[in-house]
Image: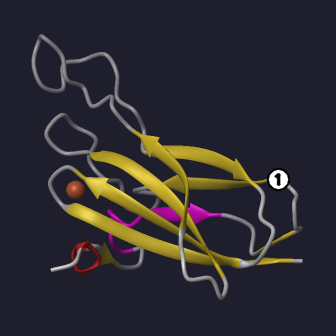
């Protein structure tokens, strides 16, 4: 068994767990740009103490390279837990964040996300560099 065999994927427009990567199709080498990561853009995912997205991670795989690079990790820790009980807490973190980066070469942005009860999910988006 390999962890990759357990990571599910799909179209984020039809599957609420799939991480959404919003980034330019093409960027300039060495220039900063923003990548927005979210889950539930089209179909909202629950954000409750019992059922929520824990994190989204971003990776970059340069074209033609053997190895993938870790880029960023967004953790979402507010899910309504409280001494008063589940979902009675004062804070719920939305599953959304923006990462700023620059690239030297073209490749693929890859995101993984984790639902506390529905496991691991992934998506990817190619990006060209001029
Ligand atoms: Fe879920």
Q: Give the farthest residue toward the bottom.
A: 64
Overall secondary structure of the magenta stretch? loop
Give the image location of residue 106, x and y in percent: 74, 78
Residue 28 within the magenta-colored segment of the rendering: no
Residue 19 within the magenta-colored segment of the rendering: yes
Give the image location of residue 76, x and y in percent: 38, 37
Residue at 46 percent of width and 55 percent of height: 57
In the picture provided, is 76 more to the left or to the right than 51?
Answer: right
Looking at the image, is 87 positioned above or below residue 58? above
Residue at 29 percent of width and 77 percent of height: 4
Dot 1: what SS?
Answer: loop
Q: 10 or 107: nearer the eye?
A: 107
Residue at 36 percent of width and 58 percent of height: 113
* The C terminus sits in image quarter: bottom right
In the rendered image, which residue does mark 1 sit on?
32
Q: Which residues are magenta?
A: 14-22
Image quadrant assignment for residue 121: bottom left
């Amino acid at each position: 068994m390999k962890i990759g065999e357990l990571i599910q994927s799909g179209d984020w427009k039809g599957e609420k767990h799939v991480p959404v990567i919003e980034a330019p199709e093409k960027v300039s080498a060495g220039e900063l740009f923003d990548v927005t990561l979210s889950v539930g853009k089209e179909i909202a995912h629950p954000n409750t103490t019992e059922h929520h997205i824990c994190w989204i991670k971003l990776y970059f795989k340069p074209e033609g390279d053997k190895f993938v690079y870790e880029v960023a990790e967004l953790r979402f820790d507010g899910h309504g837990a409280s001494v008063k009980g589940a979902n009675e807490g004062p804070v719920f973190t939305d599953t959304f964040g923006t990462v700023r980066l620059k690239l030297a070469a073209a490749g693929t942005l890859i995101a993984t996300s984790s639902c506390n009860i529905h496991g691991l999910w992934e998506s990817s988006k190619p990006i060209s560099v001029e």
